[in-house]
Image: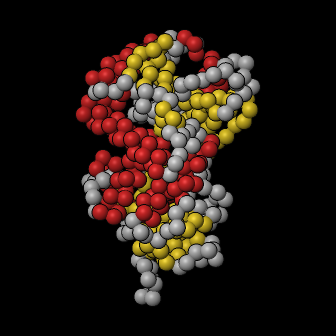
């Protein structure tokens, strides 16, 4: 770690898009920032997933409102809309492209079609551009089309955000432990042990990743690892709109000359046979070009977890963004920066929603 000094204002653990956003905001506030990444390059697993920030949640709008109540469901979708606005601004600020692509949520059966029709009505009432559309080109009857979803390049955005004179990035540097400083000579309240070297910082931020519970035990019952799978299908047919299927658990998008299918299961069932059935329905003759698997982190309620660790002062968390992580990344980081720099309330995403009696 010869490129690192000993002491920083903030150390960010993780050089994915979440960590890069955190580091960029802190550096813009004139802090000295070190970013420690266990892998050999920025972006972590960003290239394996869908480079799309969706409006809303995997769960259809009508189902979300039925489960949580109309006001709560409405507020959650408003946060994702605000995230899209913030993402556009962020991309523009570092000269990256945001491409409006919309999306089409496809109904596999009559009950799901009814749910999407109810969602379209509710979304229009709340001033979203949402329409029921024909999906017969994909072998299904109907789908719900929204217009605000964005495609972008997460890897390029991550690299651009980390390119700041106040940011030092160290790759292949896995953090082994974080502890309160023990000696008066140590110049900051936290010490970070990584690659046989101690760094010291005023604040440490655990930015995404299923590893966070290992460094912050209080997250163990709040954030869980979730396996993600991607299959690239060699298909030259046009796919102008990303598709959302299986009640939000499968996403299909154009990826170069291929179609990329990303899927997951929140119940522990094997999602791969379901993905294979969807591929057979959409493009039965397309051969598999590549397969990928990775872990993401998702909270118990599916929303990001943001705040100061209850068992470690000055250690902050922005984690649990889940399967639609790009739908939350800007708003979650904004809440973290507001709390860390300005003592602002985090609100709906606060970590303490799980720790209150």
Above or below, 356 relative to 65: below
Q: In the shown orientation, is residue 228 left or right of residue 118?
A: right
Quadrant for residue 219, please give it.
bottom left
Q: Is the C terminus in the top left, top right, bottom left or bottom right quadrant?
A: bottom left
Place of residue 325 in the rendered image (x, y in percent of width and height, measured from the top left): 48, 43
- Residue at figure coordinates x 44%, y 42% from the top left: 88
Place of residue 199 in the rendered image (x, y in percent of width and height, measured from the top left): 53, 76
Q: Can you see residue 63?
A: no
Place of residue 69 in the rendered image (x, y in percent of width and height, measured from the top left): 26, 31
Above or below, 179 relative to 240: below
- Residue at figure coordinates x 30%, y 26% from the top left: 127
> Front-most of 19 and 192?
19
> Front-most of 237 and 112?
237
- Residue at figure coordinates x 29%, y 33% from the top left: 74
Q: Is the N terminus in the top left, top right, bottom left or bottom right quadrant?
A: bottom right
Check the image and name the residue furthest to the bottom: 185
Above or below, 331 relative to 146: below
């Amino acid at each position: 770690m010869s490129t690192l000094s000993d002491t920083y204002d903030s150390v960010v653990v993780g050089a994915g898009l979440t960590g890069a956003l955190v580091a960029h905001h802190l550096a813009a506030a004139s802090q000295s920032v070190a970013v420690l990444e266990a892998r050999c390059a920025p972006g972590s697993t960003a290239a394996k997933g869908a480079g799309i920030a969706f409006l809303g949640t995997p769960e259809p709008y009508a189902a979300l409102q039925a489960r949580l109540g109309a006001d709560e469901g409405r507020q959650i979708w408003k946060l994702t809309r605000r995230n899209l606005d913030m993402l556009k601004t962020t991309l523009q600020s570092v000269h990256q492209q945001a491409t409006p692509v919309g999306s089409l949520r496809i109904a596999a059966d009559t009950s799901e079609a009814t749910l999407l029709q109810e969602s379209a009505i509710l979304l229009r009432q709340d001033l979203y551009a949402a329409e029921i559309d024909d999906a017969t080109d994909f072998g299904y009857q109907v789908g719900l089309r929204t217009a605000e979803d964005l495609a972008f390049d997460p890897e390029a955005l991550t690299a651009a955000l980390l390119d700041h004179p106040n940011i030092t990035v160290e790759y292949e540097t896995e953090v082994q432990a974080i502890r309160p400083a023990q000696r008066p000579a140590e110049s900051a309240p936290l010490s970070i042990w990584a690659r046989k070297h101690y760094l010291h910082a005023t604040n440490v931020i655990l930015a995404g990743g299923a590893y966070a519970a290992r460094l912050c035990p209080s997250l163990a019952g709040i954030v869980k690892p979730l396996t993600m799978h991607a299959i690239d299908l060699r298909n030259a047919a046009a796919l102008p709109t990303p598709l959302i299927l299986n009640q939000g658990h499968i996403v299909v998008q154009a990826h170069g000359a291929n179609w990329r299918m990303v899927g997951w299961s929140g119940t522990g069932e094997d999602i791969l046979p379901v993905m294979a059935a969807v591929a057979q329905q959409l493009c039965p003759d397309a051969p598999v070009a590549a397969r990928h698997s990775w872990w993401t982190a998702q909270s118990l309620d599916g929303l990001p977890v943001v705040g100061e660790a209850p068992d470690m002062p000055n250690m902050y968390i922005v984690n649990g963004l889940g399967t639609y992580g790009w739908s939350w990344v800007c708003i979650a980081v904004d809440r973290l920066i507001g709390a860390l720099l300005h003592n602002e309330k985090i609100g709906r995403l606060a970590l303490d929603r799980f720790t209150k009696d």
